[in-house]
Each structure stands twice: as C-alpha cells, then as structure tokens.
Image (spheres, coloured by chain):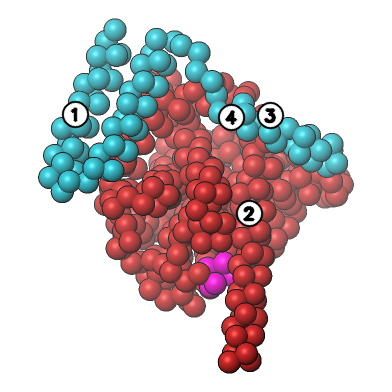
Chain colours: A cyan, B red
Amino acid sequence: MWGIAGILLIALLIIIFEVPSLWKSKQKKELWVFFLLLIFGVGLSIAKSLAVNIPNPLDWIIAVYKPFSDAMMNILK
Amino acid sequence: MLDNGKISVRQFRVLTILFTVGSAILVIPSILVTDSKQDAWIGVLLAIGTGMFIIIIYNALAVLFPDLSLVEIIECLLGKWIGSVVSLTYVFFFFYNASALLLYIGDFMTTQMMPETPIQPIMILFLAIVIIGTRLGLEVIARSAEILCFWFLLLFVVLVIFISPQIDWKNVQPVFESGVKPIILTTIHFLSFTILPLITFLMFFPAHINQLKNARKAFITGSLIGGIILFIIVFLSILVLGPDQTARQLYPSYVLAKKINVGNFVQRIEVIIAIMWFISLYIKMTVYFYGSIIGFAQILKLKNYRFLTFPFGMIMVTATIVMHPNVVYIQTFDAKTWPVYGLTYGLLLPLLLLGLAVLRKKGSRKRKLQSNSRS
C-alpha cells in the first residue's frame, strides 16, 4: 500500500515539475507523450509492487536470437 | 536540433575512453576467462585490433552524414515507417543497455558494500544523477567526463602500481593452451561489451563535435586507449588471481583491488578503487540514457527532450528489476544472447546502412550524370 502511495506521490511531483512549462509553451504533442509515458511508468511500477507477473522483453529477445546464439556457441566451443 | 551543445575533440576522446571502459572493467575479466582461461588476454588483443575496423565503419557512416544523428540517418535511408520501427528497436537497445548498467551498479553495491540495503534506493539515487546529467545536456556530460577522467586514470595507475608486486607469471602459462575457437569467442565477447556499444555515439557524434576530421581520429585513439586499459585489467586479473579464481568471481577487478597489500600497511583500499568504476559506469550510462531519449524524441519529432527524462527514469527503475530477475539469468544472457544482439545492432545494421548510403549516393550521382547528358 505504501509503495503505491509513494509511486503516485513521485508521479505527482514529476507532473508539478514538468507540466507548467510545457503547458505555457502549448506543446500539445509533448504533453500527450509525457502523460502516456508517465502513465505507463506508474502502471508498470504499481504492477511490480503488487507482484503481478510482468512479461520480460528480454525473453523475447532471447527467443529471437536463440538459433544464432546456439549456432555461435556450438561453432566456437 | 534538440540539444545545441557542441563538444571539443578532446572531450570527445575522453568520453570515448570512459565509455569503452564502462561496465566492462567490472564484469568482463570473469566472462573472458570463463571462455579461454589464461589465454583471454590474446583474445583481448585480437578484439582491440578488430575493433578499430568497426570504428572505421562508424567513421565512414559519420562522414557520409555529417549533420545527422543515427535515428535521422535511419529515417533518411529506410523511409519513414520502416525507419521508425528500426529506430524504435535502437532506442530499446540503448534503453536496455542503460538498465543493464543500472543493475550492475545496484547489484555491485548490494552484494559487495551495502548488503542490508535494498537494491531500489541505490538504483534510484544513481539514476537521479544520470537524469541530472541528461537534462543538462551533452556539453555538461562531456565536461564532467573531462574532469572525472583525471581521477579515473589516477585510480587506475594506483591500482596497477600497488597490485604489481603480487604478479605471478606462472598464472599465464601454458600460453595458447585453450586453442583457437575459445579465443575467437573471447574476442566476440570483448567486442560486444566494449566496441560495439560505441554505436551509441552516432546519436551525437558527427553533428555535435566541432571538428569532424580530428574527431574521427579521436574516436579511434579513444577506443584504443580504453581497450588498452581493459587489456591491462584482464591481464592483471589473470596474473594475480589466476584463471580459476577470476572465472569464479562476479566482480574480479574488485577482488583484485582487495588483494592490494603494500608492506602490510596500504591494504583494503578497494572502496577507493571502486570509485573508478562508478565514474566509468556513470559516463557510459548517461550516454546510453541520453541516446535513448534523444532517439525517442527524434522519432516522434518532439521540440524538446528534457521532459522525457523523468518518465523514462521511472520506467527504467521498474524495467531493470523486471528484465533482470536473477544473476544466473543475467550471466546466461550476457554470455549467450548479448554478443549476437550486440553484433546485430553494432555491426550488421551499421554495415547495412553504410551499404545503402553508398548505393544511394552512387545512384543519385548516376542520375545526375544522365540528366546532365540529356540536357
């Protein structure tokens, strides 16, 4: 519970720190990107603090490169 | 341009040295020695030689596009849609690398120095200075590298001098016991940890340096000096700790620093020596983080990049823990998948881009000649 509160507090601080200057200079696209990334970050952190099983992108990379890395290890062993 | 900073050739060389040394100084002796035992140093020498050719490829790419960053080169050559997808994978590549370094520093601190502290506070603190550096821009990163490089070299010299009495030449014998294949594997591992990540420099290399011609030389000399520093570290690890001990340790150069004992008086100074890799890790991680954010901003054509630093940092802290569940996972990834992954992004794609660029240039010249002859 405290973890989630902390994450939300940090997100709030980041918003207070960044948004006014973006708002003033009317950078709409930048604001969209900023909020999407922040929501993604907050969601990811909360999911992690609730011990939800998050898929690991490195597993996909390992799967993609497996034939090549196996071949390399076999040739050079 | 997102960041108007310009850096000098000297600063660029210093950045290259610290970036090449980077995380490798901590972890690489153990990986290399696992491959080819006491012959690892031969592989390192081979890798430094091959590495120079890779730097020449990067330089050639930089000369063809003197005022574009890597992401812009990709967009120029592959078109908007395919280019954006390839660039996004590059951004992920930089992002992953930065997070791997963040894990190294967190893991190093929690296993060696502060065993009772959880890993997250250390990562957040370290990421905070990386974010500060990124927000201040390239000029500040380069200047801090210039200042920190002196301390780095000083500590390095202290380490080398103080450890040298304990060298045991029997540890490298018999030379060439392991044969050719393991040494080639060592070479590939060394390249993938030190030279291939230098592709990140193409994010700012030609455009933000005031003299291109000297900068190309500095790129080569900088990576050469970094390579030599790493060679000395690997060689010393083998000579002092021996191949078995080096392969078994997670951070051999830290153990090396622990061994320092001059006249039973100067001893246990490993924490001071550890400042050395904090410096190199910081510079390497900042460059990766900067590269990933600049790349992301350039793909989306944003006017500013600084507001991305905090959301990216927040994602990175969680992503680091998600992407690296345990030490065995990291070590298997580093030893097996990472060399191929690094080769794709550090060698294969740049070669492809270079080939495309040369073909395009030739094509456009031919077309020009044809149109001239027609008129």
Tell me the kind of residue under disc 1. Answer: Leu
In this view, which residue lies farthest toward the front?
B375
Residue at the location (50% across, 18% down)?
A54
Task: Characterize the magenta stretch by its predominant secondary structure.
Answer: helix
- Label 3: which residue? A63
Q: Is B103 displayed left or right of A3 in the figure?
A: right
Q: Is residue B281 above or below residue B349?
A: above
User: Is disc 2 placed on a helix, strand or loop?
Assistant: helix
Mark drawn on residue B349: 2
- Label 1: which residue? A13
The segment highlighted magenta reads B60-64
Tell me the kind of residue under disc 4. Answer: Leu
- Label 4: which residue? A58
Tell me the kind of residue under disc 3. Answer: Ala
User: Is the N terminus of chain B in the top left, top right, bottom left or bottom right quadrant?
Assistant: bottom left
Q: How many numbered badges does the structure rendering display?
A: 4
Q: Chain of mark 2?
A: B
Q: Nearer the viewer, mark 1 or mark 2?
A: 2
Q: Earlier in the sequence, mark 1 or mark 4?
A: 1
